[in-house]
Image: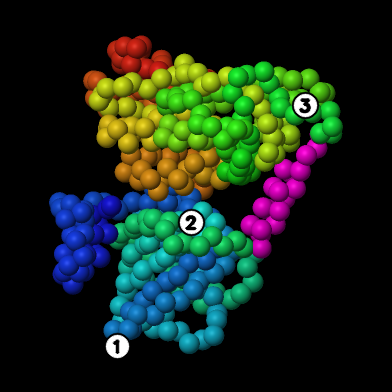
Amino acid sequence: MARAFAKISFTPDVQAVQTEMGSRMAYRAAELGEAETVALSAFEQAFIAERDSFYQATVSQSGWPYVQHRGGPAGFLKILDEQTLGYADFSGNRQYISVGNLRGDDRVSLLLMDYPGRQRLKIWGRTRVVDERNEPELLAKLELPDFRAPVERGIVIHVEAFDWNCPKYITPRYSQREVEALLAQARQLEPVLNTTHVPAALGNGVLPLTISGIRQLTPRIRAYELRHADGESLPIYQAGAHIRVPIILSDGSVTSRTYSLTDAPDDPDCYHIAVLRVDDGEGGSSALHDGWQVGTRINVEAPENYFPLHDDNRPALLIAGGIGITPIKAMAETLAARGTQFQLHYTGRGPQDMAFVKDLQRRFPERCRFYFSQAPNPTRLNVSALLANASTDTVFYVCGPPRLIDSVRQTARQLGIADGRVQFESFN
């Protein structure tokens, strides 16, 4: 939890209630020390850019709060830099309550909701109003080229604090666009193979599994939940493990692919994998996406592990690229449960293409950094700086495309880091 947020929000009255309710000691540490320099990371910026509405609270001269809903096309709340937001204020019902309140008190609080993802971002800031006469170039940056409503002014917000809420009590809701996308995904799950030619259970392994759940993580990545076909407990495994699953290709032949188990090994009744669809590959992932349904039966061998996590208290630095997050996520969860220090650095094209971004940000906000190469404000992973600043006993784990792995291994050698401290798994 950020100190800037705590210093603004935890007033004496709030502290008194925290004391009465027994939560004061848990939150007191967030107030200690000087407030940090507040900066919206690439993750917050990407989240803001995806929103098509937010709630804004202002304070009136009488001391009453006023909450207003603001809406527009996705991205209408503009990111001017890592400390500044802004939006064009269009002509509305002409009550001017929010604008009037801002004339006397420049403080605002914003609440940005992601109902399907069950996330909310709170932002505190101070505003200033800009118009065509005093700052035409800045106002032009806030305008929406395809939105025809007249712009009366611009609202520029200097961010002084922000904080993420937990997902508890957020009811998932979906816009028309999101419902249409979900329906399209559901249609893709319909079998495209003639199931009369598919055996009752694919594979010759000793472990019978049933696909008990399917979830679309990104447009190209699906998560699959697998349970024992007879309701029994599954063999235990350690973070970094994988299973090899059978897949029937479009020509009727059977092949197999290896997929990492994505969750910490704390549920003996369920395995989870995530599969990236690669349409220009060898056909395995696309056949799995097209053929696997809830109820599909497969026979596999017990999990194997060629990418094991160390079992002592040395700190870990986890690096993931793209779908390489799958074993890294399980490692992060295991290290957190163990109480072992770690950092996770996850790079990809953008949050909409990267699995588990929101879940990782919610669970490990202080330990994760995200890098988006195709975001509105691209960020790049600096491998040299990352490795150079690690402690001398840190163990490194990297999973992703060969170029990322090669960069980490070559940089480690240049810095004199022993090969045994750099563990890797390649996802081609």
Residue type at numbered disc 2: Arg
Whether residue 125 is visible: yes
State which quadrant residue 391 falls in.
top left
Element assignment for label 1? loop
Residue occupying image coordinates x 69% and y 47%: 185
Tag 2–tag 1 contact (CB < 8 Å): no
Lateral position of residue 107 relative to residue 331, left or right: left
State which quadrant residue 25 falls in.
bottom left
Q: CA distance from mark 3 to mark 1?
A: 73 Å
- The residue indicated by pointer 3 is 199
Q: CA distance from mark 2 to mark 1?
A: 34 Å
Residue type at numbered disc 1: Ser
Element assignment for label 3? loop
- The residue indicated by pointer 2 is 118
Residue occupying image coordinates x 81% and y 23%: 252
Question: Which circle marks residue 284 in the picture?
Answer: none
Camera-nearest label, 3 or 2: 3
Q: Where does residue 421 sit, x and y in percent of width and height?
A: 33, 16
Residue occupying image coordinates x 73% and y 36%: 290
Q: Relative to residue 57, is residue 97 depicted above or below?
A: below
Tag 3–tag 1 contact (CB < 8 Å): no
Element assignment for label 2? loop
In front: 8, or 181? 181
Residue interval drawn in magenta: 176-193
Q: Is residue 294 magenta?
A: no
Q: Where does residue 65 sit, x and y in percent of width and height?
A: 35, 80
Q: Is residue 183 magenta?
A: yes
User: In terms of secondary structure, what is the magenta stretch mainly?
Assistant: helix
- The residue indicated by pointer 1 is 62
Q: Where does residue 38 sit, x and y in percent of width and height?
A: 30, 53
